[in-house]
Amino acid sequence: MHSSSNSPVSRRVWVDCAKGLGILLVVYGHVSRGVLTAGITPKYAALELIDEVIYSFHMPLFFFLSGLFVVDSVQSRGLSRYIANRVDVILYPYVVWSILQGLAHVWLSDYSNERTNFSDVMSLAWHPRAQFWYLYALFVFAVLAALVVVARRSKSLPIFAAFTLVLYLFSGRFDYLPELPANAIYYVLGILYSRSRFSVSGDFYTSLVPLTASFCLAQYIFHISLGMSYRDVGPAALALALLSIGFVVSLCMWLSEIRVRSLAYFGACSMAIYLMHIMAGSGVRIALAGIFNVDNVFVHLALGTVLGVALPLLAVEAGKRINISFLFQAPSHISAERTIWPGRLRHKP
């Protein structure tokens, strides 16, 4: 949910559009699950199907997009500085927001969907909570991938990809943090895509229509005809996720051509939205149900999603005036990258 390089691919607007679309799906997915888990409304088959479709590819999409920038960033910064930068922009907000959101959950345990205590909050080093598992996994993947990249062996990345494929196929057997082996393959495929000559960018107009049709058909076959779930790890789920990523990439290349600025803006702010949307969405649900006695699922979904995006964006814009950037990446006086690279250093996003 961030870019990591000044390489040509990082300047493509389609990447921000893809992150923008992805973060909208993330917010909606969490709002929807929060409403259903709270028992505010009965379950709807259509909403459960939408949930299945979203979860079949939205996080793989983010890992794929993050992998696009690894090689150029490692090569431009060097290994130690690159890892220090990942500490500043991934590990630091992971720790800060795990504590902030965790303490909020402790305080509001009587109103939330799960009871949380202080020891749960402080176990973040080995047990990422809520949506923050993504940042935990992203930091691990970034460090491992950087070590592979600096090895400078022509076959190192394909071998790494094969290893992550095996991890994916056996990820259902992992009791501890199964999200890591289940998603590493997408991160590595993003790296390989950035290194390959293949790109849908040159012909996305002709690829968009068949990819859209294939996406709809594949989702129908997977979820309806076969009755499978995104949790059913295997070749079919992997193929569905990759096809869906291809569809989103082609779609967002088209959207960037017609200059959908709002979607690209959401993508540029996706880290802030990701960090804050759970508290915003949960606050909306608690207010609607507890104060206004609203139990209409569509009101909850609409307001929860809109405000789950809008409130973090307001915080971002306010932060430009009152300087709260320390909430999103390490400030200069404790920056790991500045320690590794002393002197005047302009942080790269």
Image (spheres, rainbow, N blue to C red):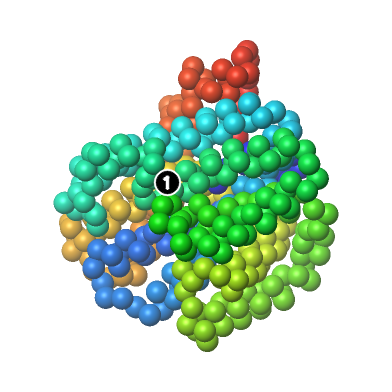
Residue sitting at x 60%, y 78%: 218
Front residue of 262/12: it is 12
Residue sitting at x 28%, y 65%: 37
- Measured as percent of width and height from the top left, residue 229 is found at 47, 74
- Measured as percent of width and height from the top left, residue 321 is found at 46, 28
- Measured as percent of width and height from the top left, residue 193 is found at 73, 54
- Residue at which label 1 appears: 132
Q: Secondary structure at mark 1?
A: helix
203 displayed left or right of 275? right
Q: Is residue 173 above or below residue 226?
A: above
Residue sitting at x 21%, y 43%: 117
266 displayed left or right of 163? left
Q: Quadrant of the C terminus?
A: top right
38 displayed left or right of 92? left
Mark 1 closeness class: few <14, some 14–19, many ≥20 residues within 10 Å: many
Residue sitting at x 64%, y 54%: 163
